[in-house]
Amino acid sequence: MQVVDQKELEAVLKSLKQLTPNIEKNVLVGATRAGAAKMRDRMRDKVSKRSGALAKAIYVKRVRMSNRRLIMQRATIRKKVLENGKGSKNTQQYAFYLEYGTAKMTPKPFVRPTLDGNYNEAVTAARSYFVTRFAKDKKKWGF
């Protein structure tokens, strides 16, 4: 049995404590952004391109998780007012009408099909980013 020096163990523990925030800050945030960007692009492809305003309003937003310092990314729709001859409505309201329909309009969903059909693609993009970035940064962290 090999004996571990107490000072060596303390040095390893110290470097691991520093490593966790570095991985979180540099690698995980980028990986979640890569996955969310993939979903954003697929939603933009599926949405009705009538004026193009709704597709432009879909973006990736940085979100801090509650009671945590962890930052994640998600694809969401920017609230932006659309002016047309019949009045105005915001892009979030319009997206809801497209997704679920109204009394006078059949639904043309674009969010749910994106989530159902492209989940694996987003996970693959996030995993690919994580592996590439972690391999690049681990030398910098001394591993």
Image (cartoon, rainbow, N blue to C red):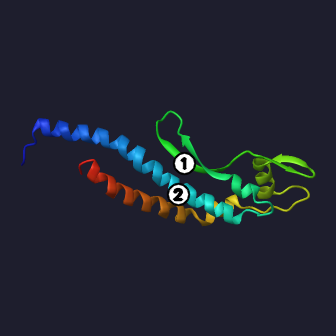
- Residue holding disc 2: 35
Determine which of the numbered discs, if any, sits on residue 55 in the image.
Answer: none
| In this view, 46 is above or below 74 | below
Looking at the image, residue 120 sits to the left or right of residue 54; the answer is left
Residue located 43% across and 49% down the image: 28
Q: Residues within 10 Å of mark 1 (few under 14, many from 20)?
A: many
Q: Position of residue 125 (x, y in %)?
A: 49, 62
Q: How far apart are labels 1 and 2 at the CA level?
A: 8 Å
Q: Earlier in the sequence, mark 1 or mark 2?
A: 2
Residue located 91% across and 58% down the image: 104
Q: Secondary structure at mark 2?
A: helix
| In this view, 8 is above or below 31 | above
- Residue holding disc 1: 73
Q: Position of residue 59 (x, y in %)?
A: 63, 52
Which amino acid type corresponds to the residue marked 1 in the rendered image?
Gln
Q: Position of residue 36 (x, y in %)?
A: 56, 55
Which amino acid type corresponds to the residue marked 2 in the rendered image?
Gly
Q: Residues within 10 Å of mark 2 (few under 14, many from 20)?
A: many
Residue located 73% across and 62% down the image: 47
User: Residue 5 or 48: which is nearer the viewer?
Assistant: 48
| In this view, 77 is above or below 64 | below
Looking at the image, residue 97 sits to the left or right of residue 14; the answer is right
Q: Quadrant of residue 18?
A: top left
